[in-house]
Image: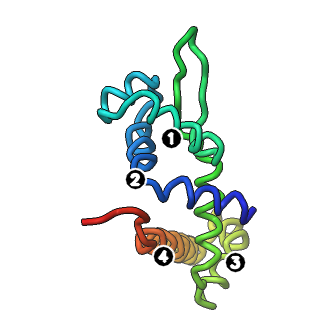
Amino acid sequence: MYVAIDEVFSALAEPTRRKIIEALKNEPKAVGALVTELEISQPTVSKHLKVLREAQLVSMAAAGQRRIYSIDTSALEDLVHWCADLVPVPEAEEQLVGNQANSQLATATNPTAQQIGRSVGRGLEQVTGRAQEFLERLPRFGRRR
């Protein structure tokens, strides 16, 4: 798994590749559309798409002679899970996560259990929020201002 994460970091270290990912985040696009939108030569876009494809960050579908690229989220999901494992979970939140199944069972019959269920949900939101904060604090490779 770490080899794949290294490839993802390496691929995303190049600013042009990050621009391509940004351009693909809302919809799949043909190579020609990326060339026009990013104002980069076709060989350069193709070279970067190859690296992104090898890192499993984008996927390609042939439509006649056109190649349509879209974001492949599997490598990004692995990266997010890896980063989330680096964020320590406070002991109280671990207990909330462990008790989630029990609280869901009791929620249907007990108003107190409903309150506990809401607390569990808030705890999970905090864990997710911390993982997102961690990812946002990671350095932006290649970005200079």
Residue 55 at x, y percent in the picture: 63, 48
Q: Tell me, for residue 130, which label it has, or none.
A: 4
Q: Mark 3 points at which residue?
A: 99
- Drawn side of residue 139 relative to residue 70, left or right: left
Q: Residues within 10 Å of mark 2 (few under 14, many from 20)?
A: some
Which label's residue is closer to the chain start, 2 or 3? 2
Label 3 and label 1: CA atoms lie apart by: 46 Å
Label 2 and label 4: CA atoms lie apart by: 26 Å
Query: Is 128 drawn above or below residue 12 in the view shown?
Result: below
* Residue type indicated by callout 2: Pro
Q: Which residue is drawn at 48% across and 76% down?
A: 130
Query: Is 29 drawn above or below residue 85 in the view shown?
Result: above
* Residue type indicated by callout 4: Arg
Asked which secondary structure carries label 3, the reply is loop
Residue 69 at x, y percent in the picture: 52, 30
Q: Residue at x 53, y 77 (%)?
A: 123
Q: Mark 1 points at which residue?
A: 48
Which label's residue is closer to the chain start, 2 or 4? 2
Q: Residue at x 57, y 75 (%)?
A: 120
Q: Is the C terminus in the top left, top right, bottom left or bottom right quadrant? A: bottom left
Q: Tell me, for residue 15, which label it has, or none.
A: 2
Front: mark 2 or 4: 2
Q: Can residue 21 be seen in this view?
A: yes
The one of 143 and 70 positioned closer to us in this rendering: 143
* Residue type indicated by callout 1: His
Q: Is residue 111 visible?
A: no
Label 2 and label 3: CA atoms lie apart by: 43 Å
Q: Residue at x 58, y 89 (%)?
A: 90
